[in-house]
Image (tube, coloured by chain):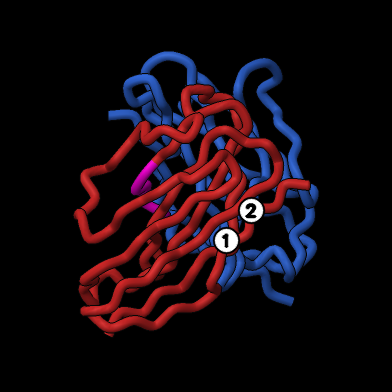
Amino acid sequence: DTEVTQTPKHLVMGMTNKKSLKCEQHMGHRAMYWYKQKAKKPPELMFVYSYEKLSINESVPSRFSPECPNSSLLNLHLHALQPEDSALYLCASSPRGAGVREETQYFGPGTRLLVL
Amino acid sequence: AQSVAQPEDQVKVAEGNPLTVKCTYSVSGNPYLFWYVQYPNRGLQFLLKYITGDNLVKGSYGFEAEFNKSQTSFHLKKPSALVSDSALYFCAVRVRTGTASKLTFGTGTRLQVTL
């Protein structure tokens, strides 16, 4: 089973709201990732957690705050977003940690976010 | 910078014909190359990867890819296209960043398979 789940599927929020995106995997994977994808563009990496520690932050604005409470769960907390942050947010995981380059990343279905 | 390029925004083929989606890479050292497919309003699905070994890699749904070191290419192929193959295809390379590594994607190629 290579399933990564994401909730909610869709989210509409105002610029003053606080919301969170959730990602879960029960495959025992030790690396988890957040990507942002604008329409008709490739995914862009935001954050990487490896063994529950933040390994990569791709200079993401502080209005996005990641959290990895345990090895199965990854959250993305959103606060004071801008309309240009509207996008598909994808979560992914890989088995043995983010330093293992030959490993496959498995993606969830994404959360489509609209910021009004 | 280590990267991949997909020179075609769109590829159109008729059902039953062979298809090729092109990808070239620019990588120092050994390349770790991946192909993903994305259907509308969905996440990315892994198709196949090249790590080392045989230059012809077989993957999911009848897809295969040929790694060509001299031409720095990793083209995705399928002998007989299906209408259901119509989707957005991404080539990607895994690059090291400090102690971690990340996927860097090409710009994507939209495949349209017609009846």
Mark 1 in CB contact with mark 2 (< 8 angstroms):
yes
**Magenta segment: does it hold A46?**
yes
Chain coloured blue: B
Q: Secondary structure at mark 2?
A: strand
Numbered mark located on residue B76 in the image: none
Numbered mark located on residue A4 in the image: 2
Display colour for chain A: red
Q: Secondary structure at mark 1?
A: loop
Q: CA distance from mark 1 to mark 2?
A: 10 Å
**The magenta stretch spans which residues?**
A42-47
Give how far across and how far down residue B109 sits, in percent: 49, 57
Say which of A96 and B79 sits in front.
A96
Examine the rendering and report whether any part of residue B7 can be seen.
no
Say which residue appears at 31% left-offset and 72% top-offset.
A18
Numbered circles on residues, count: 2
Q: Label 1, on which residue?
A: B43
Give how far across and how far down residue B88 sits, in percent: 54, 62
Indicate whether B11 appears above or below B106.
below
